Amino acid sequence: MAQLWNRFRAVVFGVLGVAAVVATWDVYKAFGPEQGVLVGDTRVLPRTTDLAMPHSWEMLQRFGEPVTGLPDAPDAIRAVFDASMFSLGLAARGWLIGVVVGMLLALLMSRLRIVESALLPWVILSQTVPLIAIAPLVRRWGSEIQIGSYVWSSEDSVAVIAAYLAFFPVAVGALRGLKSPDKTHLDLMRAYGVGWWRSLITLRLPSSVPYLLPALRLAAASAVIGAVVAEVSIGLKGGLGRMVIDYAVAASGDPAKPWAPIFGAVAVGLAAAGAIGLLGLALRPFRLTGVSTQ
């Protein structure tokens, strides 16, 4: 009962948080200065003109209107939904690749200390490379790959970029989780002659679940960001990344339109986080009880 109440309270607080953000937006829009708030020559809060800052209900209303003025143009909500599903599919592919790579690296580093010392700094260093700079390189290098009838596509490049961001939290979180069992438990395993692989299945992996779930959630969010940014950098059509660029062109005449793909990206992120929540419920029977994450 207490656990159900905690979940209900979390949902209520989440809804109240969203409502507070919307209310703050509209209140500032109504009463804020048209030129924004300036500190010296620096604008710290945006302008409140209709072109710069549409009302929240105008953004929502835009979803029910056609994307363009053409007779057969779809509604914005349909176009955003299709683009969101496209980007979500690429992010999911990248997430799966990142999880596999991250878990393999974590297993390797937890097995051999010298590998951890040699590899972990490079894993951390990999996240300092600007994503928008390497995306075109991945596309160019991938275009040279051809295995039989398989030809590398731009979608594959986006999935690889998403995996590039997703593998890092999985590798670090899983490594910490695999090293989390108490020394007494490990000594007991050795005393009974249990090998490393069996202790991995019966002790280390169940102990890593409390660390792995937050890492998987962060990896899902990173995969969504990587997919959207890669679509922008590569110029791949059909996803939210390209839609953000296309809709931003219309900002001067239709200020609510550019917010549609932004809300779509938020929805994709929430869907990814929800999927990881369901995965956490599925992994609950395999979680080792009594493991501290402090």
Image (cartoon, rainbow, N blue to C red):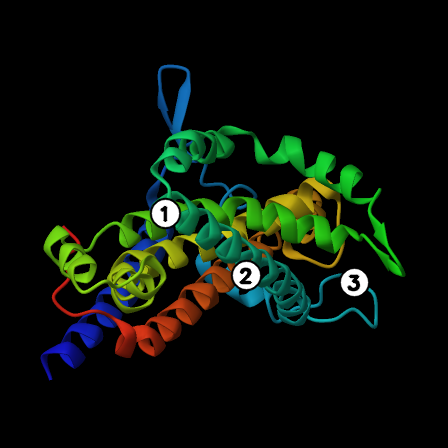
Q: Which is more toward the observer, 153 or 248?
A: 153
Give how far apart the Cα atoms at labels 3 and 2 are: 40 Å
Does the image show residue 142? yes
Q: Are marks 3 and 2 in contact (CB under 8 Å)?
A: no
Q: Position of residue 72 (x, y in %)?
A: 83, 72
Quarter holding the N terminus is bottom left
Q: Is residue 2 left or right of residue 175?
A: left
Q: Earlier in the sequence, mark 2 or mark 1?
A: 2
Looking at the image, the residue that sits furthest to the right is 149
- Chain-order first, disc 3 or disc 2: 3
Which residue is denoted by mark 2 in the rendering? 96
Q: Nearer the viewer, residue 130 or 51?
A: 130
- Tell me: 164 left or right of 116: right
- Is tag 3's residue or tag 1's residue first in the polypeptide sequence? 3
Residue drawn at x 61%, y 61% is 93
Q: Secondary structure at mark 3?
A: loop
Residue at x 31%, y 60% (from the top left corner): 195
Q: Which residue bears the numbered disc 1?
A: 111
